Amino acid sequence: MLFVANPAFLWALTAAAIPLMLHLFQRRKTVVTPFPTLRFLKAAQKRSSSRIRFENFLLWLLRTLLILTLVFAFALPVLRATGNASWFSRTSRDVAIVLDASYSMNYELERGKVWDICKDAAAAIIGGLLAGDRVCVYAAAETPLPVIEKLTTEHAAAVQAVRALPSLPTSSKLDQAVALALRALNQEKNRREKEVYILTDGQALPWHGFRDAAQKEEASADASPFAITREQREKTAFFTLLAGAQQPDNACATDVKVTPLLLLAGQPARLSARLSRSGPAKAVTVSVEVDGQERARRAVDTEPDTETAVELALGGLEPGVHVAKLLTPQDALPDDDAFLFLLRVRKQLPALVVGPQEATRYLRAALAPGAADESVRQADAAELDGIDLRDFQAVFLCDALPLSGQSVLRIEEYVKTGGVLIVFPGDRSDVSDFAALTLLPAQPKAVADIPTELAARPLKRIPNQKDQVVTFNLSLPPGTVPLVALKRVQTFGDLAEGGAVLVTAGDDTPFMLGRAVGRGRVFQFAVSANRDWSTFPLTALFLPVSHQLIRQGAGASVQPPHLVLGANIPVNDALPNYREDDAVATPGGAPLAIRDSGNRTFVIEELAEPGLYTRAKASAGQPEPVLAVNTDRGESLLTPATPEEIAEWTGFKRLLSAREPEELARLIDEFRNGRSLAELFLWLAFLLAVTEWWFANHILRSKAGATERMKVDLAGKVITS
Amino acid sequence: MSAEGIGAYLNPAQMAKLNRLALNSRYVVEGTLAGRHRSAQKGASTEFADHRSYMPGDDLKRIDWKVLGRTDKYYVRRYQDETNLRVYLLVDRSGSMNYSSGTHKTKFNYACTLAAAIGYVVLKARDAVGMYIYGEKMDAALPCKNSFNELNNALKILQGYKPAKGTAGADVMHQIAESINRRAMIVIISDLLDDQPELIKAIAHFRKNLHDVIVFHTLDPIELSLDLRSGAEFEDLETGERMIADPRAMAKEYKDLMGAFIEDYRKACSEMKVDYRLVRTDEPVDTFVRAYLEERKRLSR
């Protein structure tokens, strides 16, 4: 709305009549001038009368407008964006400040960190409030954090709270924080002036919540707890400070994958990382530190504003858990320069072989070629109850059935939590003994003798079916012929749910079956583990197949090298073999909150702190790293949003955006007190004056008449061009 | 004591500048004395004209004996007669000639000075000059004389006249054309602000009588450009009619009209083989006359 600060001056508008008065006055005051060619004057006047009238009208208009604009300029017109308050009285004002607390706010600009700039701006906003005005402050993070939850008139305390607020190592969702701020503002209905200030670095990602919420609202009528009503969008005054870099420059790793999943001592590893680049294309040097020592380095040509895949090779590592970091060069946003992950290297894969000596001889020899190798333990079925199966990567049952009921239950639990069970039949076991093992891919039906002429069978891997969970790659040493001679085989009934025939002997005799159970695997053979039923233990196939079974099972239950902050995950996924008496500490040293969600299923409440989590087992006092937790790097790909985009995503009708705190202060001042248009009117008057001068002195004389087009020489000779 | 006669219009320096100039006619003229201008008569001269058959009574000295020897026929030689030039100055003293835009002379005053300069040049070439002064009617008709005293007297008479109120240029010119019965040179010094077709007809009348006609169209610079700074109430010098106008607003249309007016005269004169010259009153007379006569001499070669 337009107000006039000096309305008394509007009386001067009557001066607009001056040009007309002067014109009329001039007409009467004439000087008689004798002239010889009056007839030409009369004819010229007749010809030009309409043009003269029009030009006179234009001149009059210009002069009148000039006077009007001058009068308006001196009357000090003020344009106010709000119509709530009158000019002479002030209403109470409620203000909500939403601070984007994401880690991208730590971007370093020339004038300091964006986070500090925004905190200073927030303090300035609070400092600019008058007594009686109320304020609340919210920090936008992954979940909104109330700094001052309810509106307060204690401005000094609010400034102190803002100053003490640390930035958070998370992404941010501005929509939720703004919704909470609006809810706080709407607690008081009588207040007339409501303002929301969103102080952020201006990255697009935190604003996407507004867009997604709007789409969800259209899709379903269910009200979200963070819904912003149409009235709030249209009637509340929103101010945004987009203080971040317009052309950010940042590089960081967003993900690291380690292959193979299960690392053994001395085995080389390959790191597949994704490198996010904000800014123009640039060669970035990435390096990998393992236990504080640089182990790999390479330069990567990154594409502008996108992600690039990077491959790095690591040499063989010692057994144990190694803390590794993928480092990108130091840049304006240091928070994401290091990507933390763990390399768990095992010396060997322990296996438990259950069964009589004669049935397990070949298997023990294949798994532990050296006599001193302790990775393989042999036990009888009766001893099974006293052994902690979680200490073994795989359990082989070689002609070990029947088992006691407790042993069966323990094996089932072992498999479901990620263990591998491999079952071989034998002469001591009857087909009916297998019925207690419900985990098997298929229940054996009978034992069949194979005629000598049909004994030689090639082993064939069955291609994986669609949706098949358990798979097996029969990767054999070069030159190995997958041929076995069968004497006796188990035949099988129908496949259990999730079961699959993985290898056949010949075209149709199932030789090896597999099934995924929980997070573990069960493999079942049709022949015994000794040479009584087939030549399989004697072939060159036996050793690699045995090892592959253990490794595949181990791979299925391997822990991820890193986790993302904020994850709410079962303990078994992150901390295998977790016991209640284990002490798991956060990077800050505090105990990690682990909750029993019932039925002895433990869940990590929330990974709230990035860094290295350690576990100290009750048995061994020395803590070891167990989890590497990184912030979600979604905001590392810095993509500035424009005020137009923000207006479109949010749907805010009264949105004023600034790039600098000073510009924000000016916008606030103009919004609250109005914007003076005096300067604008003065410029307009200047333009009108120039136009009037130009029109009066140039336009009217611009065209040459016929006498000027004639050339008359000194001798009076007329030459018409 | 103010100067009279030619001294009132030309100072010695100006006369000195005009001394060696001559106004030559482009056509044959008829004079009373022998001179350097071609005459309409055949007579004694050194310039051969043509032959004609011998007729009884012809002087035997004129028989061309060489032709007789070749053809056995009698022919007499004829020679181009040469005579003096009679120049009539027609000075307009109509009301419109009484205009001056400021620092310059009035058009009438300028016309008088121009007449004095032309008369002086003519007499210096031993030709004769006469003068007609007219306004609303024929005011004075002074016959051709080749005497400086007569010119001086004529200029004194001219000096005694002031511009009239109206104009009757066309009628007077017809009257003058009828009164001059021998071929002569007619010099019209006027602003030609009269009924244009009638005035053109009057000039044509002179040409019909085989006179050599020169028109000095005398105008004030302001009349050409209307370069006046402020509006005023203008009063016509002849009719007394008044009108209020802003000259700046109508300058372009005025210049177009004035340009067309001049162009009409120029075209008409060109068609009639009349020498038309536009004279601005801000030009010095001696400079103009000198430039004009040199230009005319160059063109007549």
Image: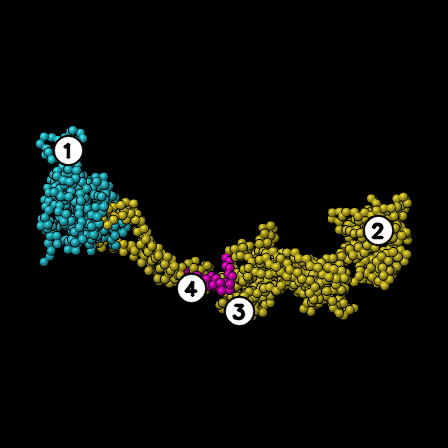
Tell me the mark number nearer the camera, choosing from 3 and 2. Answer: 2
Tell me the mark number nearer the camera, choosing from 1 and 4. Answer: 1
Tell me the mark number nearer the camera, choosing from 3 and 4. Answer: 3
**Can see residue A116?**
yes
Mark 3–mark 4 distance (CA, rounded to whole Å) = 25 Å
Mark 3–mark 1 distance (CA, rounded to whole Å) = 141 Å
**Mark 1 residue element:** helix
**Mark 3 residue element:** helix
Taking the view exactly as shown, the residue that stands out farthest to the top is: B72
Q: Which residue is tagged 4?
A: A88
**Mark 4 residue element:** loop
The chain letter of the cyan chain reads: B
User: Which label is found at residue A71?
Assistant: none
**Looking at the image, is mark 4 or mark 2 earlier in the sequence?**
4
User: Which label is found at residue B65?
Assistant: 1
Quarter of the image where one finds residue A333: bottom right
Tell me the mark number nearer the camera, choosing from 4 and 2. Answer: 2
**Mark 2 residue element:** strand
Mark 1–mark 2 distance (CA, rounded to whole Å) = 162 Å
Mark 3–mark 2 distance (CA, rounded to whole Å) = 76 Å
Q: Chain of mark 1?
A: B
Above or below, comparing residue B53 to residue A130 in the picture: above
Q: Which residue is tagged 2?
A: A525
Tell me the mark number nearer the camera, choosing from 3 and 1. Answer: 1
